[in-house]
Image (cartoon, rainbow, N blue to C red):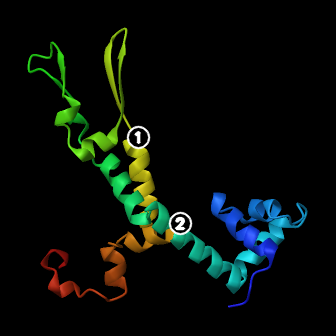
Amino acid sequence: MARLTQRQKIFVQEYLVDLNATQAAIRAGYSKKTADRIGPELLGKACVSQAIQKAMAERAQRTQITQDRVVAELARIAFADRGAFARVTDDGSRVTLTDTDRLTDDQRAALAGVKETKYGIEVSTYDKVRALELLGKHLGMFDAQSTRNLQQENNLLEAIRAQEVHTDAIPELE
């Protein structure tokens, strides 16, 4: 592997801050005028790319923050049963709160806060829809190509015209 220049080493460390190649190039001392070209160019260099991957792996090891852990935490938020925090009595006359000591770890992970207001106790959770959205993006669910591949074409008339379906096998079409 080729050795990195001092400025490339700084670029690698700065890139880890926000994963923005242009800003990392500027912070590493490259010209602001050419940083939008230099940053991606540096990412394309095998030695710089390998140094970034190594630094990211070391950081993940050091902090124990991995993609799996982030996805698991998002799943805890996305799939937590919000009804476990408070329940409306059968007659609808009052709300009973669940003691936080009785909540599961997953339920507590989704709990953003509990506070007393002038109207009573307010229980708030992290944004379930946002967590689901992030998980969906991670899985590629909202990618146009994935969506096209998931859609099933169900056009019987087109299949008959293309002679992919034999109509004598379908009694309703006689």
Residue 107: where, in percent of width, then height?
Answer: 26, 42
Would you place residue 125 above or below residue 143 in this image?
Answer: above
Q: Amino acid at mark 2?
A: Arg
What residue sits right under mark 1 in the picture?
127
Q: In this image, 2 relative to 137: left or right?
A: right
Q: Where residue 138 sits: x, y (%)? A: 44, 63
Q: On the picture, is 87 further left or further right than 40?
A: left
- Mark 2, Cα crowd under 10 Å, few <14 / some 14-19 / many 20+, is some
Q: Is residue 167 left or right of residue 133?
A: left
- From the viewer's side, name the closer residue of 3 and 170: 3
Label 1: state its secondary structure. Answer: loop
> In terms of depth relative to the viewer, which is nearer, 80 or 98?
98
* Whether residue 153 is situated above or below residue 159 in the rendered picture: above
Residue at 13% x, 79% y: name it.
171
Residue 129 at least partly seen: yes
Q: Earlier in the sequence, mark 1 or mark 2?
A: 2
Which quadrant would the C terminus be assigned to in this image?
Answer: bottom left
Give the numbered dot on residue 167: none
**Residue for point 31% across, 50% down:** 76
At mark 2, the secondary structure is helix
| Vertical relation: 9 (above or below) 161 | above
Horizontal and vertical percent position of residue 78: 33, 48
Which image quadrant is residue 68 in? bottom left
Q: Quick one: 135 or 108, which is closer to the camera?
A: 108
Where does the N terminus fall, quadrant-wise?
bottom right
Outermost residue toward the left in this view: 90
Compared to residue 170, the image places residue 96 above or below, namely: above
Residue indicated by mark 2: 59
Q: Amino acid at mark 1?
A: Asp
x and y percentages locating residue 94 in the rendered image: 17, 14
* Of the pair 10 and 96, the residue shown nearer to us: 10
Give the Cα separation between the discs numbered 1 and 2.
Answer: 28 Å
